[in-house]
Amino acid sequence: MKILKTEDRVKGSKKAFFEFQNAYEKGAKVFGLATGSTPIELYRELRESRMDFSNLISINLDEYVGLDGKDKQSYRTFMYEQLFCAKPFKESFVPNGKASDLVVETKRYDEILQKYPIDLQILGIGNNGHIGFNEPGTSFSSMTHIVKLTDSTIQANQHFFEKQEDVPTMAISMGIKSITDAKKILLLAWGEAKADAIKAMIEGEMTEEVPASVLQRHSDVVVIVDDAAGSKL
């Protein structure tokens, strides 16, 4: 695991862009993408770059259950606004949060991941150590599954919605094994609120109570943190 510390998220995102560009130039064809506030600066760098994704594949980590892909709060809409509007991929996969049979949808997504193994996976980390929507206690062997979101995760996502009661309480998420099957992983974390999770992920015991700690056993992980997120290392 390689740890890169930077002064702030802007400089950290530039380092993340370099890592992404390096994978692209080395022939990466399938990129696993994350949502939320953490990768926004990275996506801005990608929008303004000269990279061409029109023959590449993107696969997103997760989607809220109950939101149509056209919903303004859906992760498909987020990805369009933050990246796809300027840099469309040949194919972009996001779970269908409105699927009539969610179990069938999770199996469909696993088939996509099997067909298109991820070369580079972008990750954030939750305050409780979650990756994707894999909350503490999720099995390290989990594949795509339906998740009941914890109160802390719902609260963390509230700022994207007008009212807390509008925040979905369930999601479809790639599982921990789905994530760690990626050839290379790039995890980003900004702010003091992430400091405990970063310390537990890197220096703590590898345990399912800290889902991100599974990355200790992955062969190619780059972690980029700002000074605040890395303050307890």
Image (cartoon, rainbow, N blue to C red):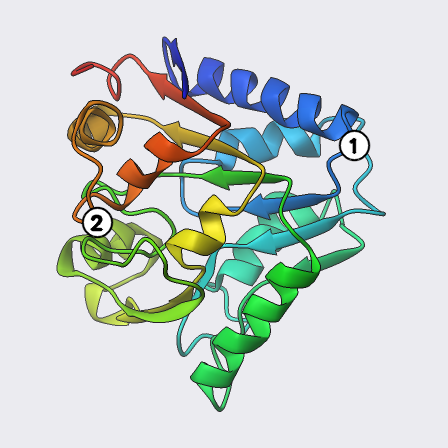
Q: CA distance from mark 1 to mark 2?
A: 33 Å
Q: Is residue 50 above or below residue 58?
A: above
Q: Amino acid at mark 2?
A: Glu
Mark closer to the chain start, 1 or 2: 1
Q: How many marks?
A: 2
Q: Nearer the viewer, residue 17 or 67?
A: 17
Q: Residue at x 31, y 56 (%)?
A: 134
Q: Amino acid at mark 1?
A: Gly
Q: Residue at x 85, y 47 (%)?
A: 55
**Picture coordinates of residue 61, whole percent (x, y):** 49, 55
**Picture coordinates of residue 215, whole percent (x, y):** 37, 35
The quadrant of the rendering that contains the C terminus is top left
Between marks 1 and 2 in the image, the one whose residue lies nearer the viewer:
2
Q: Nearer the viewer, residue 137 or 94?
A: 137
Q: Residue at x 56, y 61 (%)?
A: 76
Label 1 neighbour load within 10 Å: few <14, some 14-19, many 20+:
few
**Picture coordinates of residue 97, whole percent (x, y):** 47, 75
Q: Residue at x 19, y 53 (%)?
A: 136
Label 2 belongs to which residue? 208
Give the label on residue 74, or none: none
The quadrant of the rendering that contains the N terminus is top left
Please state if 10 lies on the left or on the right of 131 as rendered: right
Please state if 1 lies on the left or on the right of 137 as rendered: right
Quarter where residue 65 is shown: bottom left
Q: Is residue 193 above or below residue 33?
A: above
Label 2 neighbour load within 10 Å: few <14, some 14-19, many 20+:
some
Label 1 belongs to which residue? 27
Q: Is residue 139 above or below residue 49?
A: below
Quarter where residue 103 is shown: bottom left
Q: Is residue 54 above or below residue 3?
A: below
Marks 1 & 2, CB-CB < 8 Å contact = no
**Picture coordinates of residue 121, whole percent (x, y):** 54, 41
